[in-house]
Image: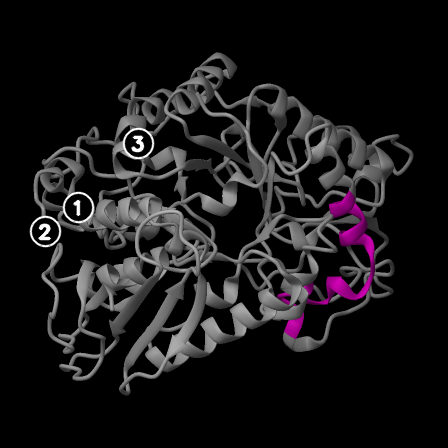
Amino acid sequence: MTELTAQWWRDAVVYQVYPRSFCDSDGDGIGDLAGIESKLDHLQWLGVDAVWLSPVYRSPMADFGYDISDHCDVDPVFGDLAAFDRLVAAVHDRDMFLVMDYVANHTSDQHPWFRAALGSAESPDRRRYIWRDPAPDGGPPNNWIRAFSPEPAWTLDESSGQYYLHLFLPEQPDLNWSDPRVRRDMGEVLRFWMDRGVDGFRADVIHCIGKPEHLEDAPQDLAGLPACIFDQGPGTHECLRELRRVIDGDSPEEHLFLGETAVFDRRQQLSYLGDGDELHLAFNFLAVHTRWDAAAWRSELAATYEAYGELDAWPTWVLSNHDIPRQATRFGSVARARAAAVLLLTQRGTPFLYQGEELGLLDAEVPPHRQVDPGGRDGCRAPMPWSADERGGWVPDMWLPPPPSAATVSVEAQRGDDGSMLAHHRRLLELRRSLPVLRSGDFELLDAPEGVLRYRRHLPDPAAGPHTIEVAINFTASVARDAVSPGEQLAGTHHAGGPSGISDTLLPDEARVVVP
């Protein structure tokens, strides 16, 4: 049975589940909570420590759960609160932790708060959202553009004559976090789920919740990214500190507060950690979008460790999620995705693994008539293939098409193959769990031939296992010589293990973890 300990996430590998596409228990073509519960043994066998659920709240599904109509209930497509409680218990019984998405920036336009706010500027719930009078020409109040569209981030409520703000879809009106009732009630949402056993929260676009007071026009090149200017005022940080106090409650540092901080300024990203009193962890989107290139990764690693080291803060590492193309698609091959797994799981910090990456999935090819996501992200959300058949064990009318070669990349097909991507991930996760040097050791970049990334993890006084590990990754399609120290191979893309004195040469796309 899982016991909460202070900052448990520092040693954890977190696995993201996109519930609609994970496992369908009732044959309706959509994944659900019972399906997730039925596959927890797979996650335990794989070796992950925590499960992060994308939204399962009640929702009209305009943005597939990120438009919430009731923050304290489960949408029937996924099950109900009893099914959620069973899932929490099952996760804890396997000594894992459960993290939920927390969508704080906006609600659904079907939320009772917004329905009550419509039509009258005198409504008591009006202040829960952000309303402005039209510009002098009758158009939107400023030049902000919503995500996934060239359209304004404002919609006119004709009955009241005012516009409401929505940084995303019109069906997702932004909450007004300067309203004390919003802060109070959204704090109660956190308490509701913690009382049900949830161990932490991943806060969706949390950098967006504090808006500039006067909502001025953005510079033209940022009109579609107005969140980039939000850090000018203290609003976001004040709200984060208040939420952190709720999450800490009487047991500080036991419940995780993780933020989707989708900004590309490292200082701004780090600012959301506050003085240890805001987020515990902030997603590093600079790393997410680093291209597959040794020099680019060397620069990103150096900058990240320097910045986090100055604050004595703990970094995160993530290479894919439900919003961006999968690693094998983005980096160009499954071979590179194997190397990327080594890169991800040998860093100092908390790694996040998106469902299906352990199988080396490619993005699905979704024909126009099957496309459903307003942001064009369907390909990376294709259903997880479990069985060795053309649909991966899903019914014919599943909500999205399966990924390519579903039968051959399925869990069933890979489970017994020691050379599979699945076995590769399991070895890396087992290695990380067994060696303290990989979880908490120091990080040092090493000299390497062009196109190769080399680094060392070192722990002066390890509790168990070697105190120095070297990782070398060949980012090129050529053989790289003098690329890695000879020694005992612990893991790698091309071999499960190896004897002492192995070659110092890396094959194309090869990654190796050795004791030098």
Left or right of 167 on screen, residue 406: left
Tell me the residue that label 3 is attached to: 44
Residue found at the very far right of the displayed protein: 122
Q: Amino acid at mark 3?
A: Gln
* Above or below for 396 versus 155: above
**Image position, residue 426 (x, y; %):** 23, 44
Spatial separation of the CA atoms under disc 1 and disc 3: 14 Å
Tell me the residue that label 1 is attached to: 423
Closer to the chain start, of discs 1 and 3, is 3
Magenta span main SS = helix
**Image position, residue 122 (x, y; %):** 91, 34
Badge 2 marks a residue whose secondary structure is loop
Q: Residues within 10 Å of mark 1 (few under 14, many from 20)?
A: some
Left or right of 161 on screen, residue 1: left
Q: Quadrant of the N terminus?
A: top left
Give, as a single range, the part of the protein colored magenta: 222-241
Residue found at the very far top of the displayed protein: 82
Spatial separation of the CA atoms under disc 1 and disc 2: 6 Å
In the image, residue 280 lies in the stretch drawn in magenta: no
Residue nearest the observer in this picture, 180 or 448? 448
Please tell me which residue is depicted at 39% across the width and 55% down the height of the picture: 437
Badge 3 marks a residue whose secondary structure is helix
Query: Is residue 33 visible in this depiction of the protein?
Result: yes
Marks 1 & 3, CB-CB < 8 Å contact: no
Marks 1 & 2, CB-CB < 8 Å contact: yes
Left or right of 422 on screen, residue 375: right
Closer to the chain start, of discs 3 and 2, is 3
Badge 1 marks a residue whose secondary structure is helix
Left or right of 406 on screen, residue 94: right
The image quarter in which residue 229 lies: bottom right
Residue nearest the observer in this picture, 347 or 120? 347
**Image position, residue 292 (x, y; %):** 33, 73
